[in-house]
Image (cartoon, rainbow, N blue to C red):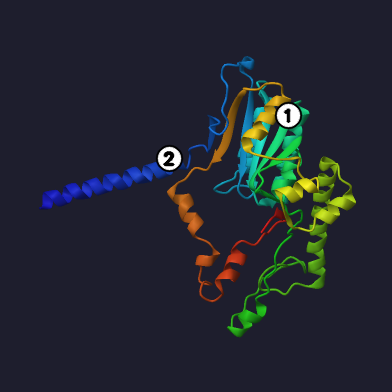
Amino acid sequence: MKKDFRTGLIVLIVLILIICGVTVASLYLPEKTNITSSSIYKVDYTKNYKGQYVGIVNLTGTIEEKNNEYSQDWILNTITKLKNDKKNIGMVLYINSPGGSVYQADQVYFALKEYKAAGKALDVYMGPLAASGGYYIACAADEIWANRNTLTGSIGVIAGQSFDMTEFLDNLGIKSETIHAGKNKNMLNYNETLTDEQRQIMQSIADECYEQFCKIVAEERGLTIGKVHELADGRIYSANQAFTNGLIDNIGSFDKAIDNFTAKLEKPGIKVTSYSYEAKKNFVSTLIEKVNFSNSNAKGLLPEKVLEDIDNSDLYPAYLYK
């Protein structure tokens, strides 16, 4: 009996050590860039074109520094890699995103402009959602394609959210105070009432980012700034509405968009290579994802919707559809 117990204990310890080793090792493994021949588009390999190829880059998820679906470093590095590869002659950027940070969206937009400046063709195909920052990035393309069920637009800015919980905390007999220097240093914190001056500060940031967005749309889509202002009230548009208003160029299937792209290049049947971001997964990152504000001691004191909004509040200007 004791021998069986010792054997079982040894096996258990070995399994724990293996799991820990895999977890630690995964922390140092590079993020994966899946590079595979597109299974969506049928490629005619009988035509060589001297090793030339078209890249399909998949941009999915909220545009920020990094999350489970998106990595800013990955998308910028992939665009740069294709720009510097002489065998790559064009890119179709597939977008399925609600948008995201003003800073990151603008970075990707300029990276795509540099890609085009290298003499390479660029089209965008919109998936289910290409809104706000997703549409901002799409404006860099020579042509924008959308599925007939795509939602796009949402041209507008969120500069931040304020949750004034001072009265609620007073009712609970809780006193929260942030020691700060500079009268506006603590603005947007839950324990301080937003002043008119602070509201104007955030509004001025939103207005500046908004005008930047509108200017990009006007320049890239050949629209007057006045027309863009009419369209840019933050609403989303169906594919047909976006086409009617000049926000996109074509409505059709992904295959049709690729056929059109390769026809423009006069290289039908050219090799197509797909690039997708895949975040590495490990025990530590999974654990961190589960530890957030909504799981803190505040849970139960506030309605779930309020906790969710606080947890997801933007601490930076964002081209984001919510």
Q: Quadrant of residue 49?
A: top right
How far across and down, in percent of the image, does residue 191 sit?
66, 73
Q: Amino acid at mark 1?
A: Ala
What whole-number distance in Å separates the C-alpha atoms at marks 2 and 1? 40 Å
Q: Residues within 10 Å of mark 2 (few under 14, many from 20)?
A: few
Nearest to viewer (mark 2 / mark 1): 1
Could you tell whether 229 is left or right of 52 in the image? right
Give the label on residue 121, or none. Answer: 1
Looking at the picture, tell me which residue is in the foreground, 72 or 3: 72
Looking at the picture, tell me which residue is in the foreground, 246 or 9: 246
Whether residue 103 can be seen here: no
Q: Which quadrant would the C terminus be assigned to in this image?
A: bottom right
How far across and down, in percent of the image, does residue 107 sit?
72, 42
Q: Quadrant of residue 205?
A: bottom right
- Where is mark 2, residue-wise? 25
**SS for tag 2?**
helix
Could you tell whether 89 is left or right of 19 in the image? right
**SS for tag 1?**
strand
Q: Residue at x 42, y 43 (%)?
A: 24
How far across and down, in percent of the image, does residue 72 sit?
64, 43
How far across and down, in percent of the image, does residue 298 sit?
53, 72
Q: Amino acid at mark 2?
A: Ala
Q: Residues within 10 Å of mark 1 (few under 14, many from 20)?
A: many
Q: Residue at x 31, y 48 (%)?
A: 16
**Disc 2 + disc 1, Cβ < 8 Å:** no
Q: Residue at x 70, y 40 (%)?
A: 145
Looking at the picture, tell me which residue is in the foreground, 229 or 207: 229
Could you tell whether 102 is left or right of 282 in the image? right
- Circle nearer the N terminus (2, 1): 2
- 280 versus 258 height, above or below: below
Could you tell whether 250 is left or right of 78 in the image? right
